[in-house]
Amino acid sequence: MTVHHCRRPARRAAALLGVASVIVTGSIVGAQAAAAGPQRVDPGAGLLATSVPASTSPAPRPSTPTQTPTMPQDRAGCEAAYEVLSEWPGGFVAQVRVVNVSTFSSLEGWTVRVELPAGEATHAWSSTVVTDADGATFRAASWNSFLTSRGTAEFGFQGTGSPTPGTVTCSATPR
């Protein structure tokens, strides 16, 4: 089998195309071409040509805006989750979990307010309690008043009446 190469050099092809060089990949192979003997071959048939511009400077890259990294906003303070542990006619036991919602800051001296529209807190543990006509205010004990970042504390209380709370709020001092 005879393989015929294009007689035009790559430089001449590049000059004709107006580029610095031509990169050619592929080959022309065929049993029919070899059997028929020497034939005139179209220089571009069966070839893939990629042109490279004559300019020596690299193509400009698309610009991407530079973003200044920012720290996420830290939520300050605490949240309180109220849960009824047990209930009987005329009374109940509830537990409250206090959570420091800050990712970066500690808290000192949390206070939770539980509105009890149809009830009253009568005894508390792991906190001190002050009651009034609308509900109760619980303050941290000396040993659980400090909450690290994402830290928690729990306290509980016994109450009379309905355990259904109104609003439950939490406040604390950042440290």
Image (cartoon, helix red, strand yellow):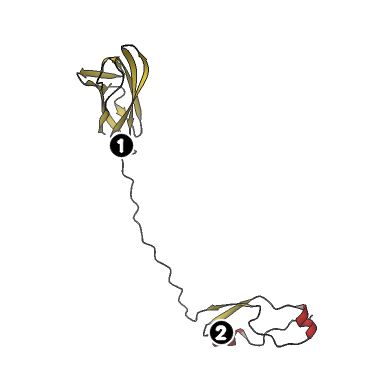
- Position of residue 72 relative to residue 123, above or below, is below
Kindly identify the residue that appears in the image at 55 percent across and 81 percent down.
Answer: 21
Can you say which quadrant of the picture contains the C terminus?
top left
Is residue 2 at all visible to an observer of this figure?
no
Q: Position of residue 2 (x, y in %)?
A: 77, 82
**Cβ atoms under marks 2 and 1 closer than 8 Å:** no
Camera-side residue of 140 and 79: 79
Identified at 35% across, 57% down, the residue is 67
List the residue tagged with mark 1: 105
Mark 2: amino acid: Ala
Residue farthest to the left? Answer: 133
Q: Which residue is mark 2?
A: 14
Give residue 96's position: percent from left, percent from top.
33, 23
Point out residue 123 in the picture as x, y percentages from the top left corner.
28, 14
What mark, if any, has residue 170 been given in the picture? none
Q: Quadrant of the N terminus?
A: bottom right
